[in-house]
Amino acid sequence: MTVRGRRRLLLGATALMLAVGFWACARPGSPEGGQVPDIPPLVTSTRPDTLAVVDPFTSPVRFEFDVPMSERPATGQLRDAVVVSPRTGSVSVRHRGDRYEVSMEGGFQEGQIYRVTLLPVLQDRFQNRMAEPFDLFFSTGPEFEPNLVAGLVMDRLTGEEVEGARVDAIPEGDRPGHSTVTDSTGVFAFPFLPSGRYELVAYEDRNRNREPDFEEPQAAMTAELATGDTLVFTDVALLLPDTTPAVLAEVEVLDTMALALEFDDFLDPEWPTEGVSARLDRPEGSLPPVLEVLHEHEWEERQRAQAEAQEPDPDDPDVDPEPDPDDPEEPPAAPEPEVPPEEEPVLPSQVLVLVLGRPALEPGEEYEVTVEGVENINGVPGGGGSVTFSVPELPEEPPPEEPPAEDPSAAPDPDTVPQEPEPPPPDPDTLVSPS
């Protein structure tokens, strides 16, 4: 994760806690000046109030807005636009003009810290969406603990943040679980999460059944939370589950000394390749040995380093210009402080590169490569396989260009015709006077 990503995560979590503190002191109000069609709708009041401690109740939770709202969210259904945590029964959402009412089967039970989140897919009648999610916290008994669990959810294969991923915090014992959804930057947060041990499960809920299915990218981790703790997870990487090993699918000849092996699964770029065995076979003739097995990014870095070593350095000329004695010598400029570049994450690849020794691959010949001991990105061992491939013929080098033949009839070029040297002027000391 880059420095910028970590900063965004920490700032997002801090901003959320500050916003919660603000809600405890003031209630949101409607903007002055009346309704403006292109302004996002705002929540003006809630029932119960934010951070209120109330008795258990069966009536709905109410959210009132400053403008009439639409019964159709921008995406999905109305029931998917609201997240209730903990979810102790089935949830229903009703639209009533300028407000929404959220009910739960069995009511809001005793002894819980509830969080009801309106997602920013809700919109007014002018199709102006909410600018950001709105959270309502209230308690049916317990005191609010100043706890926070937060994290950044990313796609393991692309490195991109995942918006709208569902995150469940499942406690030990019979306590109900808590849920939330990542925002547009992939950040999730659980403020006021009661102390205890939790299993955190993040997943893309593609079928919207609120459960991580085998066909959905997911990740799991454990959190131990005490009163006053703040836990931040910076590497929640979603990945499709897999139980089968990687199979060799294709071989590409990079050059006569290197082969690219492509598998049907992705490979962890940090997985060590020392345990991989590979060999070449052919009906007859000599075979090059396999010297190294590299990840694709390792091969590319080596190629770049070799190319840079062959290029001349423009800042280091062979001959320094001689200083002009008439110009005063200027003091050297102070060196600028070096700013280390942000490290870009190395993404998974489906390719391993075999580095071969002598003798080289022979163009036009057919070989078979066999590889064993490959582990895919899910940690499933036993991958490999055999593939037969042909070495392409090397392109023929074009013959050197010959200089054009001279045309004898063409007029001579005055610049190329040798000229008679002009005689030197006479020396005045050697001139003879006429008699």
Image (spheres, rainbow, N blue to C red):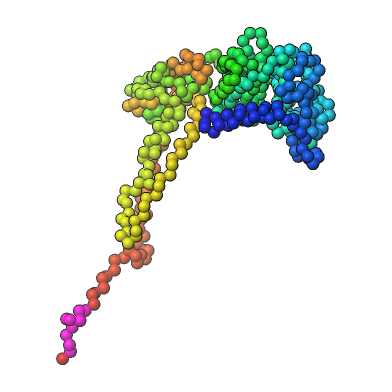
Horizontal side of residue 391 vs 90, given as left or right = left
Please state the horizontal and vertical placement of residue 63, each as a whole percent of the image. 78, 26
Q: Which residues are magenta?
A: 426-434
Could you tell me residue 27's position as x and y percent?
Answer: 74, 30
- Quick check: can you spot residue 80? no
Displayed quadrant of residue 254: top left
Residue that extends furthest to the bottom in the rendered view of this protein: 435
The residue positioned 35% from the left and 28% from the top of the image is 360
Q: How many marks?
A: 0
Farthest top residue?
173
* Secondary structure that dominates the magenta span: loop
For the residue pair 115 and 237, the one nearer the viewer reads as 115
In-image side of 70 versus 384 (left or right)? right
Front in this rendered view, residue 419 or 423: 423
Residue at 64%, 16% in the rendered image: 194
Q: On screen, 371 above or below 12?
A: above
Quadrant in which the C terminus is drawn: bottom left
Q: Which residue occupies 34% across, 65% down?
A: 415
User: Quarter-wise, where is residue 134 in the image?
Assistant: top right
Residue 430 lies, in percent from the top left, at 16, 81
Q: Is residue 288 above or below residue 243?
A: below
For the question of whether residue 8 can be seen, the reply is yes
Q: Residue furthest right?
A: 97
Q: Decide which of 366, 86 is in the foreground and name it.
A: 86
Residue at point 75%, 24% (across, down):
49
User: In the visual, does 18 lie left or right of 320?
Assistant: right
The stretch drawn in magenta includes residue 427:
yes
Quarter-of-image position of residue 92: top right
Q: Is residue 28 within the magenta segment? A: no
